[in-house]
Amino acid sequence: MAEPYDTLLQVQGHDTELDQLRHRIEALPERTALADVRARRAALAATLTEVGAQVDGLAARQSALEEQIAASARRRHELEERMRSGAVTASRDLQAMDAEVNQLADRQRALEDEELELMEEEEPLDVALAERQAEAVALEAEEARLVAAVAEAEAGLRASIDTVAAARAAVAAGLPEDLAERYERLRSHLGGVGAARLVGGRCDGCHLTLPSVELERINNLPEDQLATCPQCDRILVH
Ligand SMILES: [Zn+2]
């Protein structure tokens, strides 16, 4: 191995490391966990809205019942007052009023039973709502923790990228321009690997063994002469 190929392999090493660092930023486990928490929060918000609407519906029915109960009680109270006042003396009228008072009392009991049923129906919904709300608070805290964890991990990786990129730039400055261009072109469409070593008759880029005729031809080339893999076209450092 001779220059500039030794330098080229160093550049390739730095580029591979940079690609791995960038991939690690994309694939941070904290980022995956964050997306999961956000999806769970969205689903929970939908459930909260749904249960909340059910509770509101029951509460509205309950307050309508309470109004009816109050109106019924008021009417009964009025009748009882009039009966007690002595203003009504005819027994037929008093009997009719007494019958209405009894009817109103029956109606009030029925409405109160209905209200009790509503309250029983609402109880488990209130419990569910409180549980989901507590879960939402916990998820919100978890999201905040993960946002910070992603930022921290990302900052660490970006610092590494800066360090490696600086080292790469320093090494790459020593490459002849045409070789650097050829390498970049190959790298861009061959999965990030533009230059590979020839190891034991195999190209370290495509991992295929070279035909013996090609191998012999490359082995006979002067060390400083450019060779390429006949299979993948990468610059082959021999
Ligand atoms: Zn190859």
Image (spheres, rainbow, N blue to C red):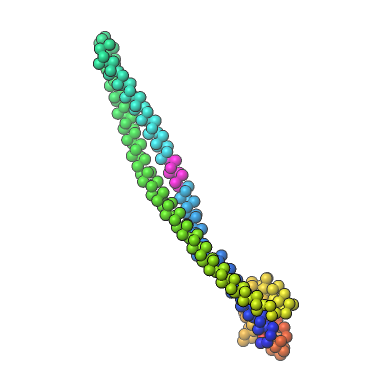
Does the image show residue 7?
yes
Q: Is residue 114 magenta?
A: no
Residue 195 in the image, given as x and y percentages of width and height? 66, 78
Q: Is residue 49 magenta?
A: yes
In the visual, does 57 lie left or right of 226? left
Over which residues does the magenta segment extend? 47-54
Image quadrant where residue 154 sits? bottom right
Q: Residue at x 35, y 44 (%)?
A: 124
Which is nearer the eye, 126 or 95? 126
Q: Residue at x 45, y 50 (%)?
A: 44
In the visual, does 34 lie left or right of 3? left
Which is nearer the eye, 194 or 214? 194
Which is nearer the eye, 208 or 33? 33
Q: How many marks?
A: 0
Image quadrant where residue 63 sits? top left
Q: Where 220 sits versus 236, above or below? A: below
Which is nearer the eye, 52 or 161? 161
Image quadrant holding the C terminus, namely bottom right
Q: Where 150 sits versus 2, above or below? A: above
Residue 143 in the image, given as x and y percentages of width and height? 47, 57
Residue 205 in the image, given as x and y percentages of width and height? 63, 78
Q: Where 165 sits versus 213, above or below? A: above
Q: Residue at x 71, y 83 (%)?
A: 227
Image quadrant holding the N terminus, namely bottom right
Q: Residue at x 30, y 21 (%)?
A: 77
